[in-house]
Image: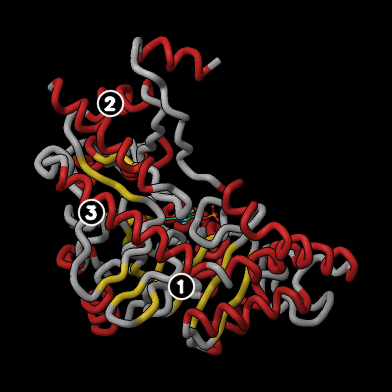
């Protein structure tokens, strides 16, 4: 039905096959046998929660990321919540973060009854502007929570420097940035705590929800291992008040298979990004379509390929009619959402975030996307701007 409508809308032109925004079925087709072996192993063991499969994943991820400890949990959102719980952040405390992110980066702060204090983004990278952090610090500040948005690390050196000078811990939201490098270090392993997500659309995605915490602090690691199992080390003895946030063995087994392919998939995403740079240049669209800027010393893993345009909604409609899906991350800044209205923000408070919300659009970038499909996408964008 949708296909027919698209054909009618384009009129006489032949309609090329619709391009998916993300093609997880193509990915599965390539790893099907390995995944089925792993899943069968878990089913035969009938050990479903934590256990040896999860421990093996934790070991492999701590090796891959270069972090002393890796603690799996039930989701990226829970990883953020557990990080704040482990640091003892609570009522009356403040946590500095950005309003240009997925809601979970901020909701975790409210969940522990602390107050989110927003700092604007640097417009070139969409990540927290380190120059604005000090101005947001008060005697109540208990953590700084930068987000590595779209797969590009925030500028961690100045952030860590501020954290050290003020004695404030740094929690990295690396949910979109597994494998991303910042000056030869893995994003998510630079701060006191790193939080990762295995949501299916992330670069390392499970067959459901999953998350991970990393730290080089053994005391925090120990606390996190207790907090994720109701605050208990020994059965029915509760040292702390925790939650139930454990990773399933089935997820761990599937993630262990996928981790073997992560670098290859990341390289495919980077190759696709490179092709977009060439194509947008070839079509002379660099004025109309502002491409992501990767500062030197950074390694972008392109969980999303986000460009800025004027006339975004008209462009998206045009592309949709040509069978090209796009997404907007994020259409509305968090400081202006009803759930955070009690913070008392108004339009104009965080101008770089608000402008980004009006201009950004994400194009397909998944590893299996073909060069031909990318040319078609850029051609249709050129077609739109010719008519403008
Ligand atoms: C996906 C995501 C989360 C939450 O992860 P879930 O596993 O979906 O709970 C947190 N922060 C950011 C920036 C994300 O993209």
Q: CA separation, marks 2 and 1?
A: 35 Å
Q: Residue at x 50, y 19 (%)?
A: 3
Q: CA separation, marks 1 and 3?
A: 24 Å
Residue indicated by mark 1: 194
Residue 220, percent from left and from top: 54, 82
Res 95 visible: no
Residue 360, percent from left and from top: 26, 41
* Residue 167 sits in quarter: bottom left
Relative vertical location of residue 329 with respect to residue 134 in this rendering, above or below: above
Residue indicated by mark 2: 313
The image's mark for residue 292 is 3
Q: Residue at x 33, y 27 (%)?
A: 319
**Of helix, strand and loop, which one carries label 2?**
helix
Q: CA separation, marks 3 and 2?
A: 19 Å
Q: Residue at x 24, y 67 (%)?
A: 137
Tell me, yes or no, whether the two marked residues, 3 and 2, touch with CB atoms within 8 Å.
no
* Residue 385 sits in quarter: top left
Q: Residue at x 38, y 70 (%)?
A: 180
> Which part of the image, by quadrant, shows the C terminus?
top left
Residue 31, percent from left and from top: 65, 60
């Amino acid at each position: 039905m949708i296909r027919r409508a698209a054909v009618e809308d384009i009129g006489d032109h032949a309609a090329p096959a619709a391009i998916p925004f993300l093609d997880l079925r193509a990915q599965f087709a390539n790893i099907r046998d390995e995944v089925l072996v792993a899943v069968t192993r878990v089913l035969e063991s009938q050990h479903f929660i934590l256990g040896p499969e999860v421990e093996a994943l934790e070991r492999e991820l701590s090796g891959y990321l270069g972090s002393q400890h890796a603690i799996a949990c039930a989701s990226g959102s829970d990883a953020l919540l557990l990080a704040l719980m482990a640091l003892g952040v609570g009522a009356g405390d403040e946590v500095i973060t950005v309003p240009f992110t997925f809601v979970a980066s901020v909701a975790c702060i409210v969940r522990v009854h602390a107050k989110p204090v927003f700092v604007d983004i640097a417009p070139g990278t969409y990540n927290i502007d380190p120059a604005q952090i000090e101005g947001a610090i008060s005697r109540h500040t208990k953590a700084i929570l930068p987000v590595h948005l779209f797969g590009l690390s925030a500028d961690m050196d100045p952030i860590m420097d501020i954290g050290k000078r003020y004695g404030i811990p740094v929690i990295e939201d690396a949910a979109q940035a597994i494998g991303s490098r910042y000056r030869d270090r893995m994003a998510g392993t630079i701060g006191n705590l790193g939080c990762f997500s295995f949501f299916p659309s992330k670069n390392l995605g499970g067959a459901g929800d999953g998350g991970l915490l990393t730290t080089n602090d053994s005391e925090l690691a120990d606390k996190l291992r207790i907090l994720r199992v109701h605050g208990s080390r020994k059965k029915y003895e509760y040292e702390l008040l925790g939650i139930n946030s454990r990773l399933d063995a089935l997820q761990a087994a599937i993630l262990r298979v996928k981790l073997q392919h992560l670098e290859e998939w990341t390289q495919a995403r980077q190759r696709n990004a490179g092709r977009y740079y060439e194509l947008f240049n070839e079509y002379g669209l660099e004025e109309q379509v502002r491409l992501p800027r990767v500062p030197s010393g950074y390694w972008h893993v392109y969980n999303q390929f986000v460009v800025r345009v004027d006339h975004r909604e008209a462009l998206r409609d045009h592309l949709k009619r040509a069978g090209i899906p796009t997404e907007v991350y994020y259409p509305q800044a968090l400081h202006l959402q009803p759930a955070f209205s009690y913070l008392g923000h108004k339009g104009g408070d965080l101008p770089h975030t608000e402008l980004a919300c009006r201009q950004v659009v994400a194009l397909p970038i998944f590893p299996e996307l073909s060069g031909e499909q990318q040319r078609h996408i850029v051609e249709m964008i050129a077609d739109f701007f010719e008519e403008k």
